[in-house]
Image (cartoon, helix red, strand yellow):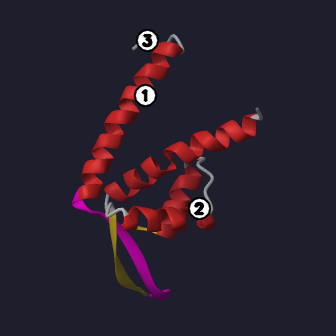
Amino acid sequence: MKLENAQVQMRKGILEFCILEIIGRGEAYASDMLEELTAARMIVVEGTLYPLLTRLKNAALLDYTWKESSSGPPRKYYVLTAEGRQFLGELRDTWEDMAVSVGIIRGLGG
């Protein structure tokens, strides 16, 4: 197994959680999400982000509004739905449980 493949799979596994966390802080524009993910060393491209946003919208976890932009066409801003906020809360609980479990396995306590 190649290290790069394992790293890609780990990132894919938490990308949805990270995107929901970003949107959970308030409405978010896709380009701003890409910048934040990149700054956090989560390398994501538009071709990955937009289909994921569409899937989350189709699952009723996200909604969006269009806002006029002074620098071009209107922009789509994403927000969590009530169902999305609940889902994010459950993902946070899962993340905490997994972090504790991995810590125990790595001998870091728990």
Where does residue 74 sit, x and y in percent of width and height?
A: 43, 86
Tell me the CA gap for discs 2 and 1.
25 Å
Counting residues from the start of the chain, the first of labels 2 and 1 encountered is: 2
> Compared with residue 24, is residue 97 higher up or lower down, i.e. above or below?
above
Q: Which residue is mark 2?
A: 48
Which residue is depicted at the point 39% across and 54% down? 20
Q: Which residue is mark 3?
A: 109
Q: Quadrant of residue 24?
A: bottom left
Tell me the CA gap for discs 3 and 2.
35 Å
Where does residue 38 sit, x and y in percent of width and height?
A: 59, 54
> Compared with residue 110, is residue 76 higher up or lower down, i.e. above or below?
below
Which residue is at the far front?
59
Query: Which span of residues is magenta-colored?
Result: 70-82
Which residue is depicted at the point 34% across and 64% down? 62
Front position in the image: 35 or 2: 2
Where does residue 57 sit, x and y in percent of width and height?
A: 38, 67
Q: Which residue is mark 1?
A: 98
Q: Which secondary structure lies at badge 3? A: loop
Which residue is depicted at the point 35% across and 42% down? 91
- Going by the numbered disc 2, the residue's amino acid type is Thr
Counting residues from the start of the chain, the first of labels 3 and 1 encountered is: 1
Mark 2 nearby-residue class (10 Å; few <14, some 14–19, many ≥20)? few
Front position in the image: 4 or 55: 55
